[in-house]
Amino acid sequence: MMLMMKTINYIYINFKIGGLTMSDNIYSKIAIKGNEFFFTINNKSKYKIPSKFFPIAKKSQLTFFTPQSTFEYNNKELSDEIDKIDLPMGCCYSNSNKIREIGLKLSIDLTFFSGWVLRPNDMPKHHAWLAIKNDGKISVVDSLKDNLFVELSKKYPTDYTDVNWRRKSATSLKRIIKDMPLNSQQIIIGKVPDYMYYVGSPDTIDNAVRIFNHMIAEFPKHPAYQGDGDSLNGRSKFQEELNKIGFS
């Protein structure tokens, strides 16, 4: 399956979450020109995807997944099988590969992608996800458990000025999990959330891991992984708190 969704000369800077937009937070400008994705951080640092700093597998197959270009996808058989497997946090490459293998057994064509995911108030992170083409429409399957954190932000807003915010958020998340215990409730299946944007290309798990490891070896102080709690060699501080309550 070939998934190509190139957008030429397209400006997109209005990802809304919590009443804020990307331009209110960290991305002051985003532009797409042919096979290159340009973005500016806080009106000063300019980057592009693909590049040595932000690599992808195949520039010629650069693909964009947005809230506008993706659609809902409901497949109970797929969801039921996803609910049976373990999808630990911080394991997007292997998680995506597990789900892709489920798709193979169910004759559902899931294409493995790697590249970059953008969220408000954060640098892009190297990531892996899956794409489905169904009746000419594109959907995503992403093992990020974002639905849990969206519910957390709605029901138990985080006060980041509190020195114990990680512990308190982890405790609140445990309450959310009781209402959303299934993988299919926690991860993204179908439409890209309004506050996210994916830039990447078709890939394999081995090559995606190789790209990430090479990038970090070449740029050990990569700006995408210098924020509070970000870690290249294990769990973040927040993930440690989640581990204490039995959520990995």
Image (cartoon, rainbow, N blue to C red):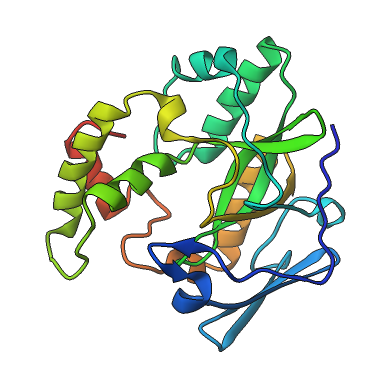
| Residue in front for this viewpoint, 4 or 56 | 4
* Residue situated furthest front in the rendering: 19
**The C terminus - image quarter:** top left
**The N terminus - image quarter:** top right
User: Eyeballing the image, is 27 above or below 56?
Assistant: below
Q: Could you say where residue 238 lies in the image, as x and y percent from the top left?
A: 26, 51
Tell me, yes or no, if residue 5 can be seen here. Answer: yes
Q: Could you say where residue 50 lies in the image, as x and y percent from the top left?
A: 73, 64
Q: Could you say where residue 154 lies in the image, as x and y percent from the top left?
A: 29, 51
Q: Could you say where residue 67 lies in the image, as x and y percent from the top left?
A: 62, 51
User: Eyeballing the image, is 61 above or below 189?
Assistant: below
Left or right: where does residue 119 sit relative to residue 174?
right
User: Eyeballing the image, is 27 above or below 18?
Assistant: below
* Residue situated furthest bottom in the rendering: 44
User: Eyeballing the image, is 69 above or below 224?
Assistant: above
| Residue in front for this viewpoint, 50 or 178 | 178
Count of marks placed on residues: 0
Residue at screen point 12% across, 59% down: 164
Residue at screen point 62% across, 35% down: 72
Residue at screen point 62% across, 56% down: 214
Residue at screen point 54% across, 54% down: 194
Left or right: where does residue 134 sit relative to residue 238?
right
Tell me, yes or no, if residue 87 can be seen here. Answer: no
Left or right: where does residue 180 sit relative to residue 7?
left
